[in-house]
Amino acid sequence: QAAQATFKSIKAVVPLLDRVLVQRFKPETKTASGIFLPTTATSSPLPEATVIATGPGAPNRQGNVVPTAVKAGDRVLLPGWGGNVIKVGEEEYYLFKDAEILAKIQE
């Protein structure tokens, strides 16, 4: 269940601590040859996402703030589960902890 946001823009969401706000890539609904795929064929979320914003980091045991491993604009690989869904209009965003993100995609 997605929490319906009451704000107008995702820019109003500022992640706290080591939280990372991402937007998953949308599966293609049309093949390269122009065939439209039914929504049931594209319903599983893709594991890739773009980082929209990050929190400042979380304190370690010594009290020093450890910054997140990713930054806004990074492409990341997500686990198949987890994340808190935030809906803004028709768009869905997800909040993950920095440690839950599997990898940064570098191209």
Image (tube, rainbow, N blue to C red):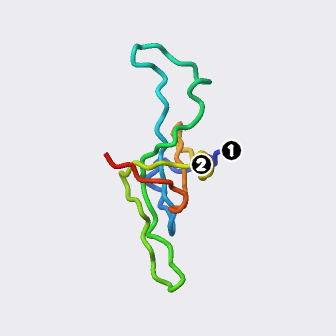
Q: Secondary structure at mark 2?
A: strand
User: What's the residue at 54%, 83% (across, down)?
Assistant: 61
Answer with left or right where residue 53 lies relative to residue 44. Answer: left
User: Which mark sits nearer the N-terminus, 1 or 2?
Assistant: 1
Tell me, for residue 1, which label it has, or none. Answer: 1
User: What's the residue at 50%, 86% (across, down)?
Assistant: 62
Q: Secondary structure at mark 1?
A: loop
Q: Give percent across and percent down for residue 41.
A: 58, 24
Which one is in front, 104 or 68? 104
Q: At label 2, which amino acid type do we have?
A: Val
Say which quadrant the N terminus sits in. top right
User: What's the residue at 55%, 58% (across, down)?
Assistant: 100
User: What's the residue at 46%, 45% (across, down)?
Assistant: 49
Q: Give percent across and percent down for residue 79.
A: 56, 49
Q: How many marks?
A: 2
Q: Give percent across and percent down for residue 24.
A: 49, 42
Mark 2 is surrounded, within 10 Å at the Cα level, by few (under 14), some (14 to 19) or many (20 or more) other residues, namely some
Gap between marks 1 and 2 measured at Cα: 8 Å
Q: Is residue 98 above or below residue 94?
A: below
Tell me, for residue 84, which label it has, or none. Answer: none
Which one is in front, 32 or 56? 32
Q: Are marks 1 and 2 in contact (CB under 8 Å)?
A: yes
Which one is in front, 84 or 69? 69
Q: Is residue 25 above or below residue 53?
A: above
Q: Is residue 19 above or below residue 27?
A: below
Mark 1 is surrounded, within 10 Å at the Cα level, by few (under 14), some (14 to 19) or many (20 or more) other residues, namely few
Answer with left or right where residue 65 lies relative to residue 3. Answer: left
Which residue matches tag 2? 85
Q: Of all residues shown, which one is farthest toward the left?
A: 107
Q: Give percent across and percent down for residue 15.
A: 49, 62
Q: At label 1, which amino acid type do we have?
A: Gln
